[in-house]
């Protein structure tokens, strides 16, 4: 997988792959994911993360827009969030400029203590898996593309 | 959902009414009038009572006078409208402690989202657009509660008091949620903002603070 690509495998066999989430829409809000998510896999420079067997999944991007003079105004991507929810808790993968963090929060508190919307059903029956594998290549984490 | 477009606007009247023109602004509810900020070239400025609505940007600029004791709310609030070349007053900004028509006012500043968000949007303030630090004297000199900028979300109700306190703006340490949750469809969120200057204030000559909207989408 190339860095910044996101692959989602669905119960109905469909595989949805976004080549670069920093600039392409995942169509997360559509009915594409209604059959249930088997797993998703997200690649960043040097690592591939896999989330599987969660009850629900969520994915969203964080942007900022500045105001008050100068060269402000443009929106800027600040972080990519990929979440897996299980048993009332959420495992969060957050990718920012030069930084990757993984943490666990109660469901409904996954974003700075507040809830996110857009959750998609998963397919579970066994323990959730949150896997990280290292891959060769440049390790620079840049949200700019 | 795709990334929403966002538009910042101000109400340049003393009439407390909604931005019914959404992204375009213009005539709004209750005879209000909404102007769209040019985020790159306009500025939000807190000034002394000597500054008047319609003053030319090329003319005199009257900064807030630091009091000899206690603190003062900036008497007037303006949009430095670069395209019009004037200080356009925002009369409903602030509280009754200012010298304009602030108070329990609701429709003062708007940010119009033309689509939904994944989480609640925030209004923040930072030293600059790198968003690495929020320690400017205007933002409390390292103590968030001392930030001179206080804001309050008014999307769902007015402040409830003519002398509302607001939340100090300072990075992610102290900020306001602009709505009660994620935005589900296109809408305006509203806020009011004031500046409180204490007698102990000592500004830096090169302050370049920014107001920041933070939101998420899928």
Image: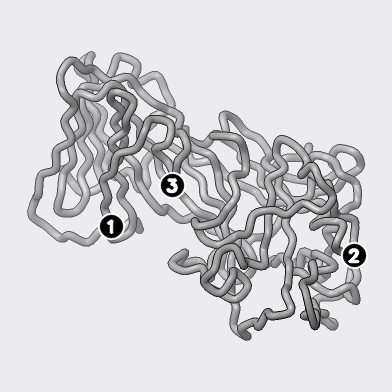
Name the residue rendered at 69%, 80% in the picture: B200
Q: Where is residue A127 in the image (x, y as percent from the top left)?
A: 16, 23
**Percent x, y of residue B33:** 85, 48
In the rendered image, the vertical position of residue B41 relative to residue A126, given as above or below: below
Q: Does mark 3 fall on the same chain as mark 1?
A: yes
Residue at point 26%, 52% (across, down): A100
SS of the residue under disc 3: strand
Q: Residues within 10 Å of mark 1 (few under 14, many from 20)?
A: few
Q: How far apart are marks 1 and 2 (CA)?
A: 46 Å
Alpha carbon of mark 3 to alpha carbon of mark 2: how far? 38 Å
B111 over B124 or under it: above or below: above
Q: What residue did someone put label 1 on?
A: A99
Q: Label 2 marks which chain's residue?
A: B
Task: Assign a secondary structure to mark 1.
Answer: strand
Q: Residue A62 carries which label?
A: 3
- Rendering coords of residue A30 (x, y %): 42, 23
User: In which quadrant will I find the C terminus of chain B?
Assistant: top left
> Which residue shows up at 19% across the image and 27% down it?
A128
Cα–Cα gap, marks 1 and 3: 14 Å
Q: Is residue B87 above or below residue A58?
A: below
Residue where numbered disc 2 is placed: B99
Seen from this angle, which residue lies furthest bottom? Answer: B205
Going by the image, does A109 lie left or right of A101? Answer: right
Q: Which residue is at the far front?
A: B69
Q: Is residue A145 visible?
A: no
Res. B78 in view: yes
Q: Quadrant of residue A53?
A: top left
Q: Report in which chain the residue with disc 1 lies.
A: A
Question: In front here: B177 or A133?
Answer: B177
The chain under label 3 reads A
């Amino acid at each position: 997988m190339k860095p910044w690509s996101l692959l989602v495998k669905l119960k109905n066999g469909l595989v949805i792959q976004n080549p670069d989430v920093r600039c392409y829409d995942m169509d997360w809000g559509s009915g594409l994911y209604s059959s249930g998510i088997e797993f998703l896999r997200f690649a960043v420079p040097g690592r591939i993360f896999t989330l599987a067997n969660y009850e629900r999944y969520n994915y969203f991007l964080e942007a900022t827009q500045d105001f008050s003079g100068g060269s402000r105004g443009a929106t800027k991507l600040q972080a990519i969030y990929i979440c897996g929810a299980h048993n009332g808790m959420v495992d969060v993968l957050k990718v920012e400029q030069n930084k990757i963090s993984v943490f666990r929060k109660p469901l409904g508190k996954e974003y700075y203590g507040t809830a996110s919307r857009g959750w998609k059903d998963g397919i579970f029956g066994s323990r959730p898996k949150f896997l990280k594998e290292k891959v060769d290549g440049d390790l620079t984490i840049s949200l700019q593309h | 959902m795709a990334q929403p477009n966002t538009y910042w606007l101000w109400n340049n009247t003393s009439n407390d009414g909604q931005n019914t023109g959404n992204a375009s602004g213009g005539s709004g509810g209750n005879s209000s009038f909404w102007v769209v900020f040019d985020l790159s070239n306009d500025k939000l400025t807190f000034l002394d009572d000597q500054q008047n609505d319609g003053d030319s940007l090329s003319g005199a600029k009257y900064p807030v006078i630091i009091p000899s004791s206690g603190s003062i709310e900036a008497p007037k609030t303006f949009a430095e409208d670069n395209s019009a070349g004037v200080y356009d007053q925002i009369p409903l900004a602030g509280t009754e402690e200012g010298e304009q028509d602030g108070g329990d006012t609701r429709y003062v500043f708007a940010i119009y989202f033309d689509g939904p968000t994944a989480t609640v949007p925030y209004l923040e303030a930072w030293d600059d657009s790198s968003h690495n630090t929020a320690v400017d004297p205007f933002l409390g000199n390292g103590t968030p509660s001392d930030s001179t900028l206080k804001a309050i979300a008014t999307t769902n109700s007015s402040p409830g008091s003519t002398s509302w306190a607001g939340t100090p703006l300072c990075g992610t340490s102290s900020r306001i949620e602009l709505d009660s949750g994620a935005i589900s469809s296109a809408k305006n969120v509203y806020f009011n903002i004031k500046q409180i200057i204490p007698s102990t204030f000592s500004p830096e000559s090169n302050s370049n603070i920014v107001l920041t909207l933070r939101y998420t989408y899928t």
